Image: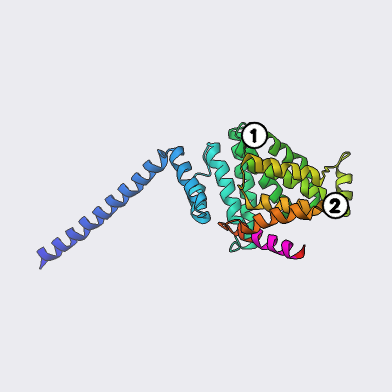
C-alpha cells in the first residue's frame, strides 16, 4: 500500500512536470514564432482576409503587431480598426475608441515611413473620421490637412483610384456645404476651403479612368454629382451602375439602397 501510494505520487509529479514542460515548450515556441514573423507573410495573410471581408479576423491578426515599426503593417491596422468601427454590430463606444485608435496607427505609420502613399491616404481618412466626434469646427479645421495628405498620396502613387475618389468626396462635401457651416469656415480661415460640383465630378471621372468599376461609392457619387448639375441622363446612367454593382460589403449594400432611392426619385 505504501509502495502503491509512492508510485501514485510519483506519477502525479511526473504528469505535472510533463505538463509544465509542455506548456513551457508551447509558450517558448509561440514567442519564438512571434519574434521571428516575416512582415511579408503577415501582410499577405492580412490582404487575403481583407479581400474576403473578414474584418474581425483581420483586426485580431494585425492588432498583435500594433507596436511594429513597419508602416505596411501599421496602415493596414489603421484600415482594419476603421473598418471594424464601421460595422453595424459595433457599439457606439467601441466605434469611438476604434476611430481614435485608427488615427494613432495611421500617424505612427507616417512617422515610420513618410513616403508610404497608403499611410498618407489612411491618415487623411482617419483624421476626417475623428472630426465626426469633435464637431464641425474641428472637421473644417482639419480639411486642408486632410486634402494635403490625399494629394501627397496621389503624388506618391498617381494610379491609386481610391485616393483620387477621396479628393472628389472632399470637393463634393465643400460644394454642398450648408450656409451655416460656410460661416464657421469663414471664421476659421482667411481663405476658407471651397469647391464646386464640377471639380468633384472631374476627380470621380479621373478615379474611374484609373481603375474602372473599382468602387460602388464612386459610381454612386458620379450619379449624385450629375444630379446636382441637373444632368438627369448621366445621373441615371451612373446610378444604375451603382445599383447593379455586386454587393460584397455592408457599404456596397448601402450604396445599392441609396442608388435605388435616387433612381425612384428622378
Which quadrant is the N terminus positioned in?
bottom left
Q: Magenta part mainly helix, strand or loop?
A: helix
Q: CA distance from mark 1 to mark 2?
A: 32 Å
Q: Is residue 232 left or right of residue 78?
A: right
Q: Is residue 262 left or right of residue 31?
A: right
Residue nearer the viewer, 76 or 21:
76
N-terminal of the pair, mark 1 or mark 2, is 1
Q: Are marks 1 and 2 in contact (CB under 8 Å)?
A: no
> Residue 256, percent across and down?
64, 60
Q: Which residue is the site of mark 2?
A: 181
- Name the residue located 30 percent from the left edge and 47 percent from the top edge: 25
Q: Which residue is the site of mark 1?
A: 158
Residue nearer the viewer, 152 or 34:
152
Q: Which mark is residue 187?
A: none
**Secondary structure beneath disc 1?**
loop
Residue segment shown in magenta: 255-264
- Name the residue located 63 percent from the left edge and 39 percent from the top edge: 210
Q: Is residue 192 visible?
A: yes
Which of the two marks, 1 or 2, is nearer to us in this view? Answer: 1
Amino acid at each position: 500500500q505504501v509502495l502503491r501510494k509512492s508510485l501514485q505520487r510519483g506519477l502525479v509529479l511526473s504528469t505535472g512536470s510533463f505538463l509544465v514542460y509542455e506548456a513551457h515548450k508551447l509558450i517558448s515556441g509561440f514567442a519564438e514564432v512571434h519574434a521571428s514573423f516575416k512582415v511579408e507573410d503577415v501582410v499577405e495573410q492580412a490582404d487575403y482576409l481583407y479581400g474576403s471581408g473578414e474584418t474581425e479576423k483581420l483586426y485580431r491578426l494585425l492588432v498583435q503587431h500594433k507596436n511594429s515599426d513597419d508602416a505596411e503593417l501599421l496602415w493596414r491596422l489603421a484600415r482594419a480598426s476603421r473598418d471594424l468601427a464601421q460595422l453595424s454590430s459595433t457599439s457606439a463606444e467601441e466605434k469611438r475608441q476604434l476611430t481614435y485608435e485608427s488615427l494613432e496607427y495611421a500617424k505612427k505609420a507616417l512617422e515610420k515611413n513618410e513616403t508610404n502613399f497608403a499611410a498618407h491616404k489612411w491618415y487623411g481618412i482617419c483624421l476626417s473620421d475623428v472630426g465626426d466626434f469633435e464637431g464641425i469646427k474641428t472637421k473644417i479645421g482639419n480639411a486642408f490637412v486632410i486634402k494635403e495628405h490625399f494629394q501627397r498620396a496621389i503624388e506618391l502613387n498617381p494610379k491609386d483610384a481610391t485616393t483620387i475618389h477621396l479628393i472628389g468626396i472632399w470637393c463634393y462635401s465643400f460644394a454642398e456645404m450648408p450656409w451655416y457651416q460656410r460661416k464657421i469656415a469663414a471664421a476659421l480661415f482667411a481663405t476658407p476651403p471651397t469647391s464646386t460640383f464640377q471639380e468633384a465630378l472631374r476627380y470621380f471621372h479621373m478615379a474611374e479612368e484609373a481603375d474602372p468599376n473599382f468602387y460602388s461609392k464612386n459610381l454612386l457619387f458620379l450619379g449624385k454629382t450629375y444630379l446636382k448639375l441637373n444632368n438627369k441622363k448621366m445621373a441615371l446612367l451612373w446610378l444604375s451602375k451603382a445599383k447593379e454593382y455586386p454587393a460584397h460589403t455592408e457599404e456596397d449594400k448601402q450604396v445599392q439602397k441609396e442608388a435605388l432611392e435616387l433612381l425612384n426619385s428622378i
